[in-house]
Amino acid sequence: MKTLRDAKIGDTVTVVKLHGQGAVKRRIMDMGITRGTEIYVRKVAPLGDPVEVTVRGYELSLRKADAEMVEIEE
């Protein structure tokens, strides 16, 4: 299983599945990250936290823990 945290800078990936429970999963979905959505990885901070991505035309920063809940395919 590959997650958004594993994606490299410049990759465009597609969301396969969201992991997590209740409010955390809901918050990720409210940010526009849903199954089938394309995500472009813009930047990754030196220690890997946060990850800056472009989703549905806007920029978003995700914590490492949240990025691990997003299963992707390239």
Image: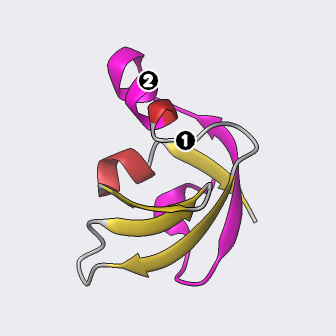
User: Where does the image place residue 41, in percent across and percent down from the top left?
Assistant: 54, 73
Which coloring applies here?
secondary structure
Structural crowding at the residue carrying mark 1, measured as other residues with C-alpha within 10 Å and reported as few (<14), some (14–19) or many (≥20): few
User: Where does the image place residue 6, in percent across and percent down from the top left?
Assistant: 52, 67
**Residue at x 70%, y 48% (from the top left corner):** 37
User: Where does the image place residue 57, in percent across and percent down from the top left?
Assistant: 59, 61
Is residue 7 highlighted in magenta? yes
Q: Is residue 71 above or below residue 48?
A: above
Q: In the rendered image, which residue does mark 2 sit on?
A: 26
User: Where does the image place residue 19, in percent across and percent down from the top left?
Assistant: 52, 32
Span of residues in magenta: 1-28
Q: Is residue 8 above or below residue 67?
A: below
Q: SS at mark 2?
A: helix
Mark 1 residue type: Gly
- Nearer-the-camera pick, 29 or 21: 29
Q: Give the residue furthest to the front.
A: 57
- Nearer-the-camera pick, 9 or 59: 59
Q: How many marks?
A: 2
State yes or no: discs 1 and 2 in contact (Cβ < 8 Å): no
**Residue at x 37%, y 67% (from the top left corner):** 51
Is residue 66 highlighted in magenta? no
Q: CA distance from mark 1 to mark 2?
A: 10 Å
Q: SS at mark 1?
A: loop
Q: Is residue 40 above or below residue 66?
A: below
**Residue at x 37%, y 78% (from the top left corner):** 44
Q: In the rendered image, which residue does mark 1 sit on?
A: 32
**Residue at x 37%, y 46% (from the top left corner):** 66
Mark 2 residue type: Arg
Disc on the earlier residue, 1 or 2: 2
Q: Is residue 40 left or right of residue 19?
A: right
Q: Is residue 52 left or right of residue 2?
A: left
